[in-house]
């Protein structure tokens, strides 16, 4: 592995992503810092996914009770 970023120690013995943002990992380059607006949008999206998950769980509980 190229130690361009100095993170080689993070990679020893496994193929995990170190999070340095400098390597061509499976997902390619990933930004490490987001704007406030981007963070807000991600949280809103996450909240919507949680609401959908809760609804599905509640539906499953009803199915199991009948």
Image (cartoon, rainbow, N blue to C red):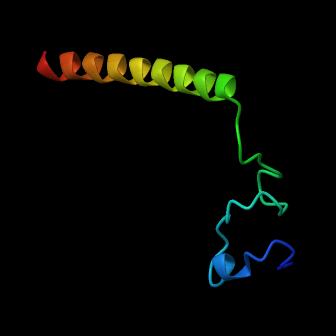
Does residue 53 appear to the left or right of 1 in the view shown? left
Q: Give the camera-side residue of 31 and 60.
A: 31
Looking at the image, which residue is at 70% across and 36% down? Answer: 34
Residue 25 or residue 10, whichever sits in front: 10
Q: Residue furthest left?
A: 65
Where 54 falls versus 27 (above or below)? Answer: above
The image shows residue 2, relative to residue 51, as above or below, that is below
Which residue ends up furthest to the front in the rendered image?
Answer: 36
Q: Is residue 64 left or right of residue 3?
A: left
Q: Residue at x 83, y 61 (%)?
A: 22
Choose top left, top right, bottom left or bottom right for residue 24: bottom right
Q: Quadrant of the N terminus?
A: bottom right
Above or below, 55 against 11 in this view is above
The quadrant in which residue 51 appears is: top left
Residue 50, image quadrant: top left
Q: Position of residue 28 (x, y in %)?
A: 82, 52
């Amino acid at each position: 592995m190229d130690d361009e970023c100095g993170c080689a120690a993070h990679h020893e013995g496994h193929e995990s992503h170190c999070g340095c943002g400098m390597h061509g990992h499976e997902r390619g380059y990933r930004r490490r810092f987001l704007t406030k607006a981007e963070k807000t949008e991600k949280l809103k999206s996450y909240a919507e996914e949680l609401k959908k998950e809760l609804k599905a769980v509640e539906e499953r509980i009803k199915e199991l009770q009948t």
